[in-house]
Amino acid sequence: MEIADVPAKFATLGLTYDDVLLLPGYSDLAPSDIDTTSRLTREISLKVPLVSAAMDTVTESRMAIAMARQGGIGVLHRNLSIEDQAYQVDLVKRTQTGIISNPVTIGPDATLEQLDRLAGEYRISGFPVVDADNRLIGMITNRDLRFTPVAEWATTKVDEVMTPMPLITGDAGISREDATALLRQHKRERLPLVDEQGRLAGLITVKDFVKGEQFPNASYDADGRLLVGAAIGYFGDAWLRATTLIEAGVDVLVADTAHGNVQMLIDMVKKLKSDPATKHVQVIGGNVATKEGAQSFVDAGADAVKVGVGPGSICTTRVVTGVGVPQISAVYEAALACRPAGVPVIADGGLRYSGEIGKAIVAGADTVMLGSMLAGTAEAPGDLLLINGKQFKAYRGMGSMGAMSSRGKKSYSKDRYFQAEVTSDDMIVPEGVEGQVPYKGSLATVAHQLVGGLHQTMFYVGARTATELQEKGKFMRITSASLKESHPHDIQVTVEAPNYHS
Ligand code: XMP
């Protein structure tokens, strides 16, 4: 190597969240003017630009439901069998909607014991009863079970206790207003919808209508069902996984590896966006950390690009491999390729405070993906851990030993770290760690603080919309002394704030 080549070997300075602050700008806004709506993909917008990470200690159906209700979206992890992941999609798509287009049903010959199991699984208390041709023959609810002793549930059939037809029903295409009027007039909790042949075409429940009012920002598809994403890979039966998830109703597929700028994953995105069976679904490609990497996904037809190589709280990729790009620079670089093509950017990993959402957006992101900030919520998978009187939840990297080894159960996601063919646990090279995070209560509380913080960012910058924030936001680079000044200092904090930890 010539001495003259040396500067070319040194990439430009990389910056991350702690290296910058946003400048305050002139603001003529009232807080109510601010709108955080942002694009997740080419065709899907979210009222709240938050995405929960596809990690087995962050996003299963409960988190995905909670995220969509808050106006964001969850991406179901892929350390699951295809059937289990598709089942999780199904659970989300059947939850809390204006009109449930494909309700869970039961047959007349099922036993009350089977009914009870189904009710627990889907957390619902009433089912339309249908015959083999999906014709509505009755309704059965918790109330109908009350008069049958539990000891007899194994032998009592649904049609012995259900409320049989004729029932109050609505037409398949009924409006929200007409449905509300019918429910009110007949004082019913549920309104089954039927087509001209008497086949079940949907179900409306009063509870869902009320919930619709409770979650004004919720992320819905065109049929009023909650939005959900799911992660896939490129290896083995990845195509079967993708098509099975699509059949289950997934809205967004996230083709996801730790290093996305690899031909096999780019080909996967290309195929998904060109095959007639799959191209209607939104596809996100990731992760990349350079303009070139983002450009590969843009050229492959991706509907969004996910950015982040090594910024995550549980990541060791940068220390194990020496590879990565500080996250503000990575997002900026990726946006250079994505912005001209109209492809949204997701800033994935490394966020610790609400103020970093705005920083990511100004750097060029449209939404942010969160792992550690959500892993401590009640909706994240896993039980509460009580340690020295304090509550925690487990959180681990998808490239950790725990997630990639056969310890406990089969790992389905080793290909995220290009180790799918490693059969012995001793040979795994982990790129993540396992640990715990403090318990934070409900996702709604955490999301409120995150969105509230973003609102304030937009107010300080003088940006009415996320696009205006991208345009108007300006960074100042700061020193480590400034960073020290930014955090509380010269005080011993005695009362914890809900949105700050040191
Ligand atoms: P945060 O900082 O939000 O990061 O906890 C979540 C993101 O980190 C990525 N991820 C990993 N990266 N090794 C890595 O290098 C891992 O084991 C690992 N697990 C997750 C992922 O992009 C996630 O969204």
Image (spheres, rainbow, N blue to C red):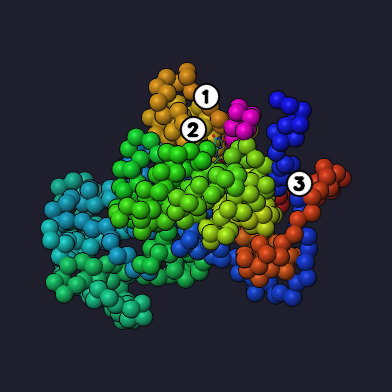
CA separation in Å, label 3 and label 2: 29 Å
State which image quarter holds ligand 1: top right
Q: Secondary structure at mark 1?
A: loop
Does 501 appear above or below 211?
above
1 or 3: tag closer to the N-terminus? 3
CA separation in Å, label 1 and label 3: 31 Å
Estimate how packed mark 1 is, as few (under 14), some (14 to 19) or many (20 or more) residues with alpha carbons within 10 Å: some
3 or 2: tag closer to the N-terminus? 3
Q: Position of residue 457 (x, y in %)?
A: 70, 61
Q: Is residue 322 magenta?
A: yes
Task: Check mark 2 vs ligand 1: CB closer than 8 Å? yes or no.
Answer: yes
Residue position for label 3: 19
Residue position for label 1: 429
Q: Is residue 168 magenta?
A: no
Q: Are marks 2 and 1 in contact (CB under 8 Å)?
A: yes
Quadrant assignment for the C terminus = top right
Q: Is residue 55 left or right of residue 447?
A: left
Write down the quadrant of residue 8 in the picture. top right
Q: Which residues are magenta?
A: 313-323
Instruction: Name the residue at 47% across, 19% down.
Output: 427
Work out whether residue 368 or residue 179 is closer to the camera in this orientation and state it: 368
Write down the quadrant of residue 140 in the picture. bottom left
| Residue 476 is at least partly visible in this image | yes
Q: Position of residue 101 (x, y in %)?
A: 29, 65
Quadrant assignment for the N terminus = top right
Residue position for label 2: 417
Q: Secondary structure at mark 3?
A: helix
